[in-house]
Image (cartoon, rainbow, N blue to C red):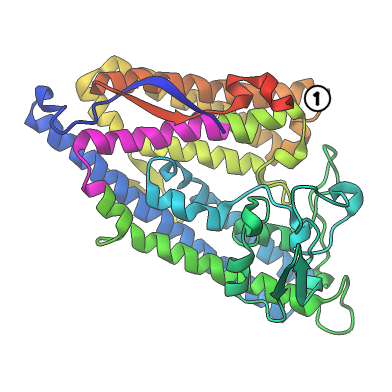
Amino acid sequence: MTSITLSLRISLVAGSLAAAGAAQAQSAREVIDGYADLALAKYSDSLAAAQALDAAIDAFIAAPSAETHQSAKNAWLTARVPYQQSEVYRFGNAVVDDWEGKVNAWPLDEGLIDYVDTGAYGETSEENGFFRANLIANPTLTVGGQEIDAAEITPALLQELHEIDGIEANVATGYHAIEFLLWGQDTNGTGPGAGARPYTDFVQGDGCTNAPCDRRADYLAAASDLLVTDLQDIVAAWGEDGAARADLAAQSDAEGLATILTGMGSLSYGELAGERMKLGLILHDPEEEHDCFADNTHNSHYYDAQGIQNVYLGRYERPDGSVMEVPSLAGLAQSVNPEVDAVVTARLEATMAAMGAMKERADSGVEAYDQMIGYGNDAGNAIVQAAIDALVDQTRAFEDLVAALDASDISVEGSDSLDNPTAVFE
C-alpha cells in the first residue's frame, strides 16, 4: 500500500491554535475527548456483540442444526455492525493499529484452517507454505522444516499460527476466520451465492460431514473465545487509564485533531475507496471483497463509511437504538469556517447515499457485492464506482477542513488502485 500526502494542513506544534483564542482551543480538547469516548462506546458495543456471538456459537456446537447454525451466522452479521464503525480509529492511533490485525485481518488463505475446494482455491502457493496446511485435519503440522503440535486447538495455538512465516494471508484468528468456519468457501465467483458450509460439518459422531468435526468445533470455539479476549483488550485501552486514551491525552490539541483526521482520511481514501473497493473493481475479483464468505461486504463497506461520518458529526447510534452525542469536529469547523463545514457535511451525506444505494441493491436481493464488481456488469460496476468517487470527494473536502484548522502537512494512506492503477497489474 502506498502513502500519499494530501494538502491536509494541521499544525503539529503545541499552541498552534492560540491565534483562534483560548475558547476554541478548549473546544478542540473537548472534541478530542469526545472522540475517545466514542471509541470506548464502539469497542464496548463490539465486545458485547462478540459475546453474544460466542454464546450463539457455543449453542451451535452443543446442538448443531440448521437453526442453531443460522443463529450463529446471524450473530456474526450483527457483530460486524458496531465493529466496522470503529475502523475509523485505525491509522491515526498506534495502539489500534498494533492490535487490529488480530481481529480483522484479510484476505485469508483459508486452506491454512480447513478443507477447501482446490478448483476454486488452487493447489499450491509459491509464497505460502501453509497455503493448504489444514490445521483442522492435521494434529501435527510440518511445513518448511517447522513442526507444530496442533493436537489441541486452543486460543494460544491460533495466536501462534496467525500470520505465521510473516505471511499476512495466514489469518488464523478474528472475524474472518470465524466467518469462514460458519459459511465455508464461496465458490461461486461473481455468480450468485455465498459460502454454503453444511451444519453437519460440526455434528459430533454419526452424521459428521468432512471430518474431523470435533476439531472443527474446537477451532470455532477457540477463535470465538479469542475474539472476545482481544476486544476486551481494546476496550480496556480506551478506558479511563487505557493506553490508547493516554496516548491521545498526551497530544496537543493540534496533534489530537491530526490523529482524528488521519484516521478519517486514510480509511476514506486508501483503505476503503482504494484497497477494499477500487482494487476489486479493477480486477473484477471476488477474492478482493472484504466479507467474502458471507456475502456481507456491502454492509462492511457501508458501516466503515458510517464510522467516518460518526466521528465528524460526533454522533453514534448504538445497537440498542440510543444515540450518543459528543463535541464534534463539525461543531469546531462551524465555529472556524461554516462554509467548509457545510461542504464536508454534504460530501459525507453524498457518500452515505452512494453507499446506501449499494447496500440496498444487495439487501433487496438484486445482487451481492461480488456480483456488482464482476466483469461486464456495467450497472453493478457503476454503483460501486459511484461509492468510490464519493469517498474520494469527501477526502478532498477534508483538505479544506484541515486548512481551516491551520498549518502543516500530514500523510494519509494511499492505494495504487487509485494513484497508479497500472501498477496493480505489475
Specify whether 217 is left or right of 83. Answer: right
Q: Mark 1 = which residue?
A: 377
User: Can you give x and y, in whole percent of width and height, for residue 161 in the image?
Assistant: 64, 65
Quick check: 326 above or below 75? above
Vertical arrangement, residue 393 with respect to residue 410, above or below: above
Q: Main secondary structure of the magenta part?
A: helix
Considering every residue shown, the one lying at the far left of the view is 22
Which x, y percent locates residue 185?
80, 54
Q: Tell whether 109 sits left or right of 97.
A: right
Whether residue 291 appears in magenta in the rendering, the answer is no
Instruction: Find the residue positioned furthest to the right.
Output: 119
Q: Residue at x 7, y 31 (%)?
A: 22
Q: Nearer the viewer, residue 246 or 318?
A: 246
Q: Residue at x 19, y 39 (%)?
A: 252
Task: Classify the position of the C terminus by image quarter.
Answer: top right
Give the extent of the magenta segment: 248-272
Name the residue located 85 percent from the left edge and 84 percent from the top edge.
205
Amino acid at the residue labelled 1? Asn
Q: Is residue 178 left or right of residue 10?
A: right
- In the rendered image, is residue 338 in sight? yes
Q: Position of residue 304 (x, y in %)?
A: 52, 40
